[in-house]
Every structure is written in C-alpha cells, then in structure tokens.
Image: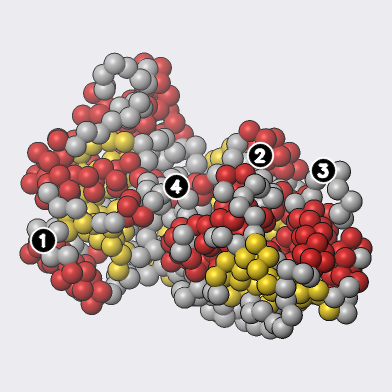
Amino acid sequence: MNETTYRQSATLFARATEVIPGGIYGHVSPALTMPGASPYFAESASGCRYRDVDGNEFIDFLCAYGVNLLGGNHPEVEEAAARQARDGNAFNHPTARMVELAERLVALVDFASWCVFAKNGADVTTWAVQVAREHTGRPKVLKIAGAYHGTHPWCSPSHGGWIEEDRTHVHSFPWNDLNAFHDLLRSHRGRIAALITTAFHHPSFGDSVMPAPGFFAEIEAACRREGIVFILDDVRSGFRLHHGGSHRLLGFTPDLTCFCKALGNGHPISAALGSAALKRSAARVFLTGSYWSSAVPMAASLKVLEIAARDDVVGHIARIGARFREGFIARAAKHGLPVRYTGHDSMPFATFAAESDFFLSQRFAREACARGVFLHPHHNWFLCGAHREADIDEALAAIDDALAATAAGR
Amino acid sequence: MERAELLATLHLRAVLPALTDLIAERDPGACAIVESDFALELRVRDDLRATVRARAGAVEVTETPGPGAARLQFRNAAALNALFQERPGVPPLPTSGFWRIGAIIRFARMAKRMSAVLQPAAASDVPRERHARLAFGVAMRALPLVTAHDEIARRILRSTPSGLVLLSVPPAGFEAWVRVTAEGVVTGPGAPTDPPSARISVRDLGSALASLAGEADSQAEVGLGRVVVEGLLPLADGFDALLQRVDAYLGRAARTRS
C-alpha cells in the first residue's frame, strides 16, 4: 500500500476556499468524490497514470472524466497541438483546421452532412435543442429522467440557479420505459421539438443501464412519425463505443449528435453534427464563444481521430475493459462482495449488490485510492488507449487488497 | 401559503418550542423566569396560535390553549412576525386574562432570553454549544413546514431521492434524523432506529455556527474535512438545499428583510 498523503492538496484547497466558491466546484469538487482520502489537485499525467501535487501516483480509471481517450498527455496529440500553437491559436478568423476537422467528422458520422464546434458538452446539447425548436417551431423537449446533459438551466442537476419556468417545456421519462415515453407523446402531440438521450443510461449515483432491445428502434420510429428531432448526447460515450458514433453500435440513426470528452484528448473542444434536413435551421441559431474557433484544440482533435482509427482504440478499450470486468467481478466475489457491474466495458461502473446508498462503494474507492488506483465511487469509470494488460493486472492486484479491506471493515 | 403566514407558522411551531429546549438545557437565565407558573396564548387566528405554559419549572408549548391562559391577540401574521424578529410592528392586544399581566412579563423576559440564545451577540454569555443545539433544533422543526409550504423547497424535494439522513454535530452534542420522501419531510431528535441512507457529521463547532448563520460554504466545508458526508450524497445535498430554504425564512438575512 502506498504511503498516500494529501498535504499539498489540503494546503492548496485551503487557499482555494478563500478565493473560489466551494474551493473546487462542479463535478471535480472533492465533496463529490472522496473528501480527505483522494487528491484534490493534479500535477502531471502520462498514459493511464497521473501524479497529484503530493507526488502520489495513480492508475487512472476516470481519465479526466472521460476526456483522455488515448491517455493523459499523449505525445503525438501534444506535438500536433504544439505545432499549431507555434503558428497561433486565436485569430480574427478560424483556421483551415476547422474545415479539415468538420470534413473529417462528417466523413466519420454516417448520417451527418454538417458540423459545428464549441468547447463543452453543454454548449452543444443546449444548442442542439435550440436547433430542434427552430426547425420544428415547437417548444417541448423530452429527456430521460436522471440523465446529465450539462449545467444549463433547462438540465442542470443542481438545485440552484434555475427557476421553474426554465423547465416548463422539459419533460422526463425513465430510461427504457416506452410506455412512459408514449404517454408523453400523447400528452404533448404536435408540441414536441426534440427528444434528447445518451447512448446508454450512465447517471451519476446510479448503475448504468444499456438500452433494452427495441428501445431505440421505437424511439426513432416515433420521432420520424411525429416530426420530432432526435438528438443523441454522445458527449461521454462518443468515440468509445464506436469510431463513427455510439448510434452505430446500438443500431439507430439520430438527427443530431453531440460529441465532446474524447474528441480533444484534453484539449477543449466539442462538436454537434446533424442531418442535411437540419442544416438551414442550424444556420439560423446563433452559435459562438470567445474561443470556439481556436485552432489548437482542432489540430489536437484531428490527431486524436487519426490515432483512434489507426490504433483501433475502440476495439482496444473494449478488450481491455473486458479483462478488467472479469478480474474485478471475480475478485469481488472472492471477498464476498458481489457487485453490479454495469455499462459498456469501455466505460463501466460497479456498485455493491448489497447496497444502494454507496457507503460500501465509498469505502472501497478510498481503499483503492490508498493503493494507487483511482476509481470514482459515484461516476462511471473509463478505460483508455494507454491501459495495457500489465496496467490492468497491476490495478486488479491493488483492487484485490482494497476489496479485502472493504470486506474486513463491513 | 404566503410568506408572512408561513413565517408566523414557523415562529409558533418551530421557534417557540425552543423555550422547552431552553429549560431542558437548564439555561440559568431562562430557569429563573419560570420559577412561577404562567400560561400565555399567542393568537392570530384559531388555526394560527400557540400556548406557552410554564408549570413546576418546566415549559410546554402546545397548539391549542388550555384553561387559564392569558391571550395576546395579534392583528395579523406580520404583527406576530415583528414580535419574533424584534422589529417594530402593531403591538398585540391582551384580550383575555389581561389582568394576569405577570404572565405577559415573564413570557417577554423568556422570549428575550430565547432570542439571546438563538441569535447570540458577539459578546454573549450563551455557550456556543447551547446555541448550536437549540438553533439546529429549531431548524429541524422548521424543515417539514418549509418543505410543505415553500415553493422552492417543494421543487428541491422533487429532485431529492427518498431516504433517511442522520445529522450529527458532535461538538455540540446534537443529533437528529430526517426522513425524506416524495410526500415531504419528517424529522426527529436523536439517532434513527433504521439505518440511515446518508450521514452528515459536522465535526467543527465553528462550521456548525457558520452554517446556522447562513455563512457556510458547504462544498468547501466538506473538502476541508470539517463536515463529513457519507452515503447517498444527492439525499444529503437535497437536505442541505432544504435547510437553506429554512434559512431563507429564519436566518439572519431574512430577519432584516422580512
């Protein structure tokens, strides 16, 4: 077991609380992870490992919440970014990188005929909803209960910062519940602009759930029939389930899809791609931000897509994820801690079968962290292109010890 | 329910019962006042009233008047709120048993002492632990009422998972449970009999007091280790958001704007 201390993290955090609300806010807040038992501040990353400001090293199964598809600080991606940076990042105009990246993405995503860029997932999910409203002239949006689409008022998971009117036209139904979906269709027929969903259900503080057979087929058919714009929020799973977008693995065709996370391997970029029928409507919905045409993230993204295809990263993380799943489940069973191991092998999540309130998960995650393996207790995990079999085996050995300690402390 | 009405309800059902806690705490300032028995009803309407009864050195607060209570009749909810917030307002009329002026005087002295404990001045003689215990007690009594009648609290409840919260403040010796369901919130003193789904432990008295004063940054407190939250975090988060709605009515900032 590592001698993990977090003194520098604690010192920095104390300083942070003086000048930053919450000290650290949002999804990376210590309050949402393992306060006092995990790093608060990172220092460096290489591949599937990272170091915190105290010099502790971790095998990483969060990958910057899914951002590092190829692993942290990938040399080829950083070289491409640095090369662009030498020429410049922000100009009065976009660079040729924007056109090149749009062409590359449109070629990758089968139903898409156009592409736009932003910085974060929420930028494009919210814009996609605006495009759907512009296209249909309708107000209503259907979404899955508990699904995360960003921090904007229509969808923020927070209790603060929004008013009832922000969500007057947003209606939710449970994942895989087609009866509830049809009830909403009947209630709001002719008024629904968009249906937005993730590729599979991966809520924080909950098990992941794959789509039931026929779920997406029926959603897609209903959207076509009713003139509803079908939006795929592929922000978290994009380029992890399938190199052409998660809908390809799951066998459906949306009208709009949103990417972020894996697209830049750490460089800030998101994208929305749409069908030809939506192109004119998309052109009418103003979309911009101070840095949204920056060239460096686009150069990085071009390199990410090239490497992901060259190295079959989707296939690799599925294979290495299966190895991790098998080892994890076997070790948990050995220690009398059966788990619910859910989601896709490339971005799985596990909770303990005996509980629904996360006490055991939190204890286990702390024990794993103390042994140099970073697993989030409430958020799905990520495999990346840099995880090798040896890394998985080393992590599983540490996890074995962590499970033993968790079982002993029950 | 309008704000003034809900606030008056909170004053009668959540704040006033702190008199009982104050005596149970053997607060010397309060105990001296209840050496003589008295009973006083504070009334706005029949459905908005409470009676304070001191008997044999103990105090009970009930929703219905008993025999022999003097009555203070308030013109409206706002007038009652002004009394509790120590602000100028239309004074109540003693409409029944007004010859028992001693009851009114003793209640006024006791209320002043309670206010000193719940809203202590910087140089107060009130032990900080006692202030924390009583103030958290008020918050726990207020929570179900605010959740039932405040629109924003209802919204928070809708996005909060059901479950049982154990709230403890070890340095103040305070413990309470909160059961959250889709229908509302129920609270009670001490540890729950069922296992909680979330545990919130305020390890630092200063953090507890800052929280009561509406000055705490919850996420920062957790990161600093002054507050430990375990279990179903969305439940604890919802509970924290609901407590902030209580603060919106009974907190220091609310007292100056109501």
Residue B208 x %, y %? 74, 54
| Same subunit, tags 4 and 3 | no
Residue for badge 3? B122
Please name the amino acid that badge 3 sits on.
Ala
Q: Is residue B75 left or right of residue B192?
A: left
Q: Is residue B8 left or right of residue A226?
A: right
Q: Earlier in the sequence, mark 1 or mark 2?
A: 2
Q: Which residue, given by chain and number where applicable, does mark 2 sit on?
A: A17
User: Disc 3 is attached to a residue of which chain?
Assistant: B
Q: Amino acid at mark 4?
A: Gly
Label 3 to label 1, Cα distance in Å? 62 Å
Mark 4 vs mark 1: same chain? yes
- Residue under disc 2 on the same chain as residue under disc 4: yes
Q: CA distance from mark 4 to mark 1?
A: 30 Å
The amino acid pointed to by label 1 is Gly
Res. B238 visible in picture? no
Co-location on one chain, circles 3 and 2:
no
What secondary structure is found at the residue carrying circle 4?
A: loop
